[in-house]
Amino acid sequence: MYYFKNIDRQQGEGQMGMDPMEIDQMGMMDGMGMGMLRSDMFLINDITEAVIREAHAYNFYQRLAELAPNDEYQRTILRIQRDEARHYHWFTMMLNMMGAQQPQIPPGDLPTGFIEGVRTAIRHELDDTAFYQNIAYRATTPHVQMHFLHASHDEQRHASWFQYMLMNL
Ligand SMILES: [Fe+2]
Ligand SMILES: [Fe+2]
């Protein structure tokens, strides 16, 4: 985190000690957003895909939490779901800052059983880990690099939690 904050500082795009969310909101409010992310506009299609993946994950985990066999697993899934809501917020904010349209979210698949749902979740989380890491590596602005790396690490951790659940059923 500090590493990225320092990059932000060098480029005059953030302030030391500020939460990334606050930087987002500043970008939105003072109108500097579009200029700030212009060099990453070639990633709009990928960021749009990321928004759809996050919305699907959020809905998927809502149902999976209802299917959870105990309170501990249910709480863990709802914590993971909150991370997805945060990612969704970051990525929609990026599209806003780039002046891009928000996507229509097509209906996604929902789990019908807990174990099957956890297996699907692991596959999606690992897919998303790689997809976001790839976006982070291609991005040119610290803002996009930081948020996609952060999300990639979150998805990796989510995959581990679901693997843990599967092993301890
Ligand atoms: Fe996510
Ligand atoms: Fe995730």
Image: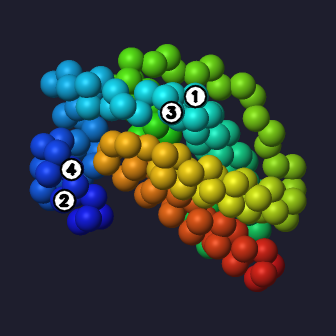
Q: Three-letter amino acid code at disc 2?
A: Asn
Q: Are marks 3 and 1 in contact (CB under 8 Å)?
A: yes
Of labels 3 and 4, earlier in sequence is 4
Disc 3 to disc 1, C-alpha distance: 6 Å
- Looking at the image, the residue that sits furthest to the bottom is 168
Q: Which element is circle 2 on?
A: helix
Residue at horizontal 57%, vertical 68%? 157
- Name the mark on residue 45: 1
Q: Position of residue 84 (x, y in %)?
A: 53, 49
| Residue 67 to residue 104: above or below | below
Of labels 2 and 1, earlier in sequence is 2
Disc 3 to disc 2, C-alpha distance: 24 Å
Instruction: Locate residue 97: give its quadrant.
Output: top left
Q: Are marks 4 and 2 in contact (CB under 8 Å)?
A: yes
Of labels 4 and 1, earlier in sequence is 4
Residue at horizontal 41%, vertical 33%? 40
Residue at horizontal 54%, vertical 55%? 133
**Which color scheme does this rendered protein use?**
rainbow
* Circle 1 crowding by C-alpha within 10 Å: few under 14, some 14–19, many from 20: few
Q: Which quarter of the rendering shows the N terminus?
A: bottom left
Of labels 3 and 2, earlier in sequence is 2
Q: Are marks 3 and 2 in contact (CB under 8 Å)?
A: no
Q: Is mark 4 within 8 Å of ligand 1?
A: no
Disc 4 to disc 1, C-alpha distance: 24 Å
Near-viewer residue (136 or 118): 136
Q: Is residue 94 left or right of residue 31?
A: right
Q: Is residue 78 left or right of residue 167?
A: left
Q: Three-letter amino acid code at disc 4?
A: Asp
Q: Three-letter amino acid code at disc 3?
A: Leu
Q: Which residue is mark 3?
A: 43
